[in-house]
Image (spheres, rainbow, N blue to C red):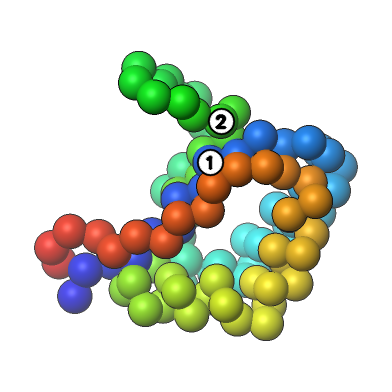
């Protein structure tokens, strides 16, 4: 079964509040088996437009990635993040096994 991924690309507008989100979010994602593959490391955007921060979280399946996003725990985390950052949040199914 293909894995599922959260791909988040954002600009932080309130670093202090965003730090609270990061602390909370890590536990929620891990509760669903999420593994952070990248969390705002160095990046280059040779084509298109990217925001300053990119995060990729891997889940065992697309369905689990979606379930985590809509879970009560992540809804609370999302309420912290949304006023502190602008960007895109994509849930995508991986390719193959």
Q: Quadrant of residue 91?
A: bottom left
Image coordinates of residue 4 in percent, x first then y, are: 34, 65
Point out which mark residue 94 bears.
none
Image coordinates of residue 6 in percent, x first then y, are: 45, 57
The residue carrying pointer 2 sits among few (fewer than 14), some (14 to 19) or many (20 or more) residues within 10 Å by Cα, namely some
Q: Earlier in the sequence, mark 1 or mark 2?
A: 1
Quadrant (top left/top right/bottom left/bottom right) for the N terminus: bottom left
Marks 1/2 in contact by CB < 8 Å: the verdict is yes
Kindly identify which residue carries mark 1: 9
Q: With respect to residue 12, does 65 lie above or below?
A: below
Kindly identify which residue carries mark 2: 51
- Residue at 34% from the left image edge and 60% from the top image edge: 92
* Residue 75 visible in the displayed image: yes
Q: With respect to residue 4, does 7 lie above or below?
A: above
The residue carrying pointer 1 sits among few (fewer than 14), some (14 to 19) or many (20 or more) residues within 10 Å by Cα, namely many
- Residue at 75% from the left image edge and 72% from the top image edge: 76
- 46 relative position to 94: left or right: right
SS category of the residue bearing label 1:
strand
SS category of the residue bearing label 2:
loop
Which residue extends farthest right?
16
Image coordinates of residue 43 in percent, x first then y, are: 46, 25
């Amino acid at each position: 079964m293909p894995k599922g991924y959260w791909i988040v690309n954002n600009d932080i507008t309130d670093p202090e509040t965003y730090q609270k989100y990061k602390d909370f979010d890590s536990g929620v994602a891990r509760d669903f088996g999420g593994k952070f593959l990248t969390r705002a490391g160095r990046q280059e955007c040779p084509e298109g437009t990217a925001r300053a921060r990119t995060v990729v979280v891997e889940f065992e399946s697309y369905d689990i990635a979606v379930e985590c996003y809509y879970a009560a725990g992540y809804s609370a985390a999302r309420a912290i993040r949304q006023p502190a950052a602008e960007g895109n949040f994509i849930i995508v199914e991986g390719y193959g096994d």
